[in-house]
Image (tube, rainbow, N blue to C red):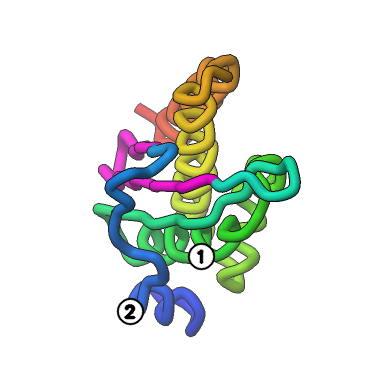
Amino acid sequence: MQFNATIIEHFSNPRNAGEIPDAGGVGTVGHPVCGDIVRLYIKIDKKGGEEVISQVKFKTFGCTAAIATSSIATELIKGKTVKEALAIKNEAVAKALGGLPPIKMHCSVLAHDAIQAAVADYKKKSGQGELMNKVQEENRRHEEKELLSRGP
């Protein structure tokens, strides 16, 4: 499988790899078929009445595309408000990498779901837990869609 130069760059030199020991939110998601796992850590600061993602790191067990999408996702959300981060869709992750092969689009969904899960964890820890149920349901739908697309 051929990947473009941006994907290879983010795979070879991932940005923001690692973990944040005192993270405000941690989201862990996995792909049931290929086995990729993404864990995203975020730290939130209040600035001007807004919740801003001041730090973000990731740990990914997975393929080239899973690592590249995790890396670019951290760059997309760092410095953004929580609301802005939640608005980032998987297509934006893929586009920021210059596109993904169709068979690897599920990696951009993992990056999206990890962002959502990390923010939901932060909200839950800060007493705003209603987002967690929505995120868990969306992640379940993504897993079912992927499993059904693979056939029996």
Pick the residue in front: 107 or 74. 74
The majority secondary structure of the magenta stretch comes to strand
| Residue stretch rendered in magenta on the structure | 27-44
Residue 38 at x, y percent in the picture: 34, 47
- The amino acid at mark 1 is Ile
Left of 110 or right of it: where is 59?
left
Secondary structure under tag 1 reads helix
Q: Estimate the spatial distance between the alpha carbons at disc 1 and disc 2, rounded to whole Å.
A: 12 Å
| Labelled disc at residue 72 | 1
The quadrant of the rendering that contains the C terminus is: top left
Residue 63 at x, y percent in the picture: 30, 60
**Magenta residue check for 23:** no
Seen in the picture, residue 18 relative to 10 is either above or below; the reply is above
**Magenta residue check for 37:** yes
Q: Name the residue under label 2.
A: 12
Quarter occupied by residue 56 = bottom left
